[in-house]
Amino acid sequence: MPMSAPLENYSQVNRAEGLQVFTFRCVSCSRYHPSRNDGNSVSNYAVRQSDGCFLCRPCSVVEEQRDLQGTSRAVGYISQDGKRVTTFIGGVLMIITESHLRRPPFGRRTTWADPKYYTFHATDVWGQRWVGQGCGPGVIAHFRRMK
């Protein structure tokens, strides 16, 4: 059952700083966690797309890792050092075993600032092997499970 919107559950409003502090309950671990809204972004939780329930950051990483088992395609962020595929908040999804700088496919646009194109081989936390492509460290890459 979806929880009510977190912005309706304010426990404190700090008008001087423009911050709205509230508490939400994670549906996975059942704990209450503080969070805040500075007007630009809300931090410290994720919303499960299938049912709109709220998850704390550690539980959201575990859920994303679990989701890798039931899919053949995935999207993740390449860490700055180029050794890991992570979630938006930095939880590890895969370890990159190989990366190769390639020429972009004809007609494929890369970033203007860094026109590089990489292919990746990675192993997820469950031991499954994946192959992916993207513009390199610091940006997202698209992966598909190897057969």
Image (cartoon, rainbow, N blue to C red):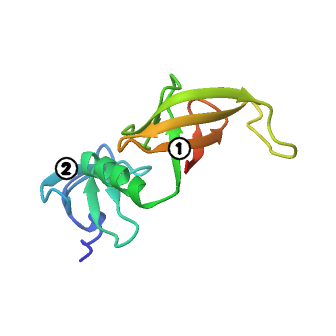
Which residue corresponds to mark 1?
A: 130
Image height of 24 relative to 108, above or below = below
Displayed quadrant of residue 93: top left
Q: Mark 1: which secondary structure?
A: strand
Percent across and percent down for residue 47 are 35, 61
Which residue: 66% across, 35% down? 119
Residue sitting farthest toward the front = 147
Image height of 82 relative to 139, above or below = above
Q: Which mark is residue 1?
A: none
Percent across and percent down for residue 45 are 30, 52
In this picture, residue 12 sits left or right of residue 47: left
Which residue: 41% across, 53% down? 68
Q: Is residue 114 visible?
A: no
Quadrant of image for the N terminus: bottom left
Q: Of residues 48 and 4, which is closer to you in this image?
A: 48
Image height of 11 relative to 112, above or below = below
Q: Amino acid at mark 2?
A: Pro
Q: Which mark is residue 34?
A: 2
Q: Of residues 146 and 12, which is closer to you in this image?
A: 146
Q: Amino acid at mark 1?
A: Trp
Residue sitting farthest toward the top = 81
Which residue: 55% across, 48% down? 146
Q: Of residues 92 and 33, which is closer to you in this image?
A: 92
Displayed quadrant of residue 137: top right
- Badge 1 crowding class, 10 Å Cα cut-off, few under 14, some 14 to 19, many 20 or more, is many
Percent across and percent down for residue 110 are 75, 39
Q: Is residue 130 visible?
A: yes
User: For the residues marked 1 and 2, what is the alpha-carbon distance in whole angstroms?
Assistant: 36 Å
In this picture, residue 74 sits left or right of residue 8: right
Q: Mark 2: which secondary structure?
A: strand
Which callout, 1 or 2, points at the residue further toward the start of the chain? Answer: 2
